[in-house]
Image: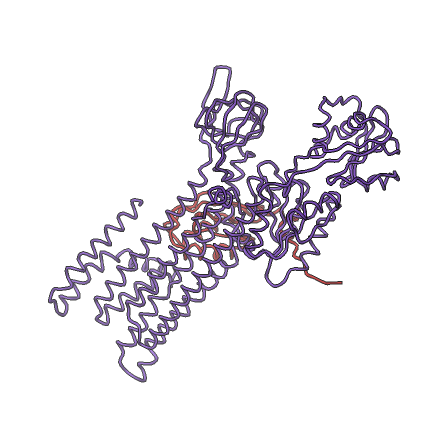
Chain colours: A purple, B red
Amino acid sequence: MEKKQKQRLARILCAAAVFLLLLPLPLEGYWRLTAFLVPYGIAGWEVLWRALRNIFRGQVFDENFLMAVATVGAFCIGEYLEGVAVMLFYQVGELFQDVAVTRSRRSISELMDIRPDYANLQTENGLRRVDPQQVRPGEWVVVKAGEKIPLDGRVLEGDTTLDTAALTGEPLPREVRPGDEVISGCVNLSGVITVEVSKEFGESTVSKILDLVENSAGKKAKAEHFITRFARIYTPVVVICAVLLAIVPPLFLGGWSGWIERGLIFLVISCPCALVISIPMSFFGGIGGASKKGILVKGGNYLEALARTGIVVFDKTGTLTKGSFTVTAVHPDRISREELLELAALAEGFSDHPISRSLKKAYGRRIDEERIANVREIAGRGIESYVDGRRVCAGNDRLMEQEGVAWRECHRAGTVVHVAIDGLYAGHIVISDEIKPDAAQAISALRQGGVRKVVMLTGDAPSAAEQVGKALALDEVQAGLLPGDKVERVESLLCQKTGKETLAFVGDGINDAPVLSRADIGIAMGGMGSDAAIEAADIVLMDDQPSKIAEAVSISRKTLRIVKENIMFAIGVKILVLLLGAAGLANMWAAVFADVGVSVLAILNASRALRCRPSLKTRFETA
Amino acid sequence: MIVCKLRAKNDLFSSKERLAFIMTKQLRLKGLDCANCAAKMERAVQKIDGVENATVSFLTQRMTIEVQKDKQEEIFQKVLAVCKKIEPDCEIQA
């Protein structure tokens, strides 16, 4: 508890003690009033003062004012006990709210405790401890065991294991060796490593994640907007009812003090605090709990949309499959196996596409760049380049069609790269990709979570796509798409939505930016690297496990369930007590429960959103 | 042919022209400890001329405002004044 809160607690305890001491005393008349004003003053002077101050500022109808009127009113009609009790409970409730909010703020900032405080910069005079913001790309920093990696970079020296849990939620440490890329925010567990910094602090992963999480509060969910609107109407309406109830009936029926008490009951219930705090707190908790698992949600609105996901569209490569292609077959025509592989590898020499990388890996030798000229990438089809002066086209069926080359079908499943030399077919190379180990589990978890349709879009050949589609039991597979086609397909899938359901698109962020922003919810995977993905997506998965999507959906559903529970419960109890109060069936105590009690319960319920169950994967491992 | 209405997400916000004269700013609200006041502040700030959008998050104690670039200093002063009026105990830091 903070100092301010402790003082408040002391005041409440003090007032409560005095109050209890006074209860059995046989005081009468003014003595009784004066005596009960003591605990009232101890507990409530601040409320009275604020109410007064705010009236002079033109801020009537705030909770201080309402509480002041309700309690002073209770004293006026001789209900001293109730007057003190209402003020005491109000203060208890306020204190509780304050503590709950502070705790939830703190637990989020602990989650986000990834900001490195310093960097050990390597200078001519040895190591110097500096602010990470001062380090420039190209400089070297040394990270010792137990320290956080301050900036993104590449390991130059040393082997070690890294704890990435704070970033990805992945409990297993990652091993790194010289040449590996490392990201800021990971904790170095064992050895000493020297890192060549590749990005400035502001561009490093840590800064981006922190920005993203902090900004998430700026995008509010519909439920939050609803509460704001509700609160704006609720308080004035209840206050007007209170006034009418206190004045109109007694004009005809008499019995002023009874009706005034009913009016005061209304005033006590007129604060929408329970909702105003607990609803944003649930979203805050949901977003915080998700980020603990390496799922970064950019705002409450996306969490809300995610909970209604009906259709999930996956990109294939790098999302459902590992994206680490390997050459599984080389079928040459006219030329030797080696020559075919060499030509394909050289033709794709400058490309960083996963297919090109696997070709180069299979080729195994250094790419002599002197031999390559005039490289032209043909989006969604392949590559055309000149190798040793010969025109080599390497790509899919469509490239061959475009070139007017007669190509042969291949019986092997996988991605087929056809090669044509100077317009003549020279054979093909088959590359296959592995399905990620948790992909099947992710899809069945999504279906259990209420997703109606799972679709895969890919630029790959139908045969390779079908194979993945069958293995994962997807509802629909659309293959052979150009990047532009994906937007079109997603648009036609958007038309198939029914009711309030939403469509989520999951991609690895490479070439996916337009689709990510077109879908209701764009989810980018492996957000560690790609800036465009972090920019365009609404939800960023820090690692590349598809099972995290199912987890994100389940977190969002849980959060929304809590939000609904709180809205129904708080509004329900308040309206019930208002009705009973109007009929004269509820007393001040019931009103205090409807105000403070409901607040406390709603906040306790909201704090469940932050606690999340162990991840799917760990649960499967322990099972 | 199915006619369907597609939402062009962030249509307005991402357009380049708009970005040219709108800027987003984050303010820290220290000592903001009443959720209702946060909502009031949000509403009041949204009404200020030149403020395109404003959100106040009670939990992160932050205000995000989108203001017209050319008038930002003037708007910023108005924001401070409005917040001071609603919650005098709250300190605003850029």
- Dividing the picture into quadrants, the one containing residue A384 is top right
- Dividing the picture into quadrants, the one containing residue A56 is bottom left
- Report the side of A132 relative to A340 (left or right): left
Q: Residue furthest top?
A: A125
Q: Residue furthest left?
A: A26
Judging depth in this view, the residue of A381 and A223 nearest the camera is A381
Q: How many marks?
A: 0
Residue A546 location, x and y as percent? 58, 44
Residue A381 location, x and y as percent? 78, 40
* Residue in the image at 24% along x and 54% along y: A12
> Is residue A516 visible in the rendered structure shown here?
no
Residue A13 location, x and y as percent? 22, 53
Q: Is residue A197 above or below residue A513?
A: above
> Is residue A385 visible in the rendered structure shown here?
yes
Q: Residue furthest bottom?
A: A252
- Report the side of A337 relative to A518 (left or right): right
Judging depth in this view, the residue of A269 and A232 nearest the camera is A269
Judging depth in this view, the residue of A272 and A333 nearest the camera is A333
Image quarter of the N terminus of chain A: top left
Residue A377 location, x and y as percent? 77, 35
* Residue in the image at 45% along x and 54% along y: A280
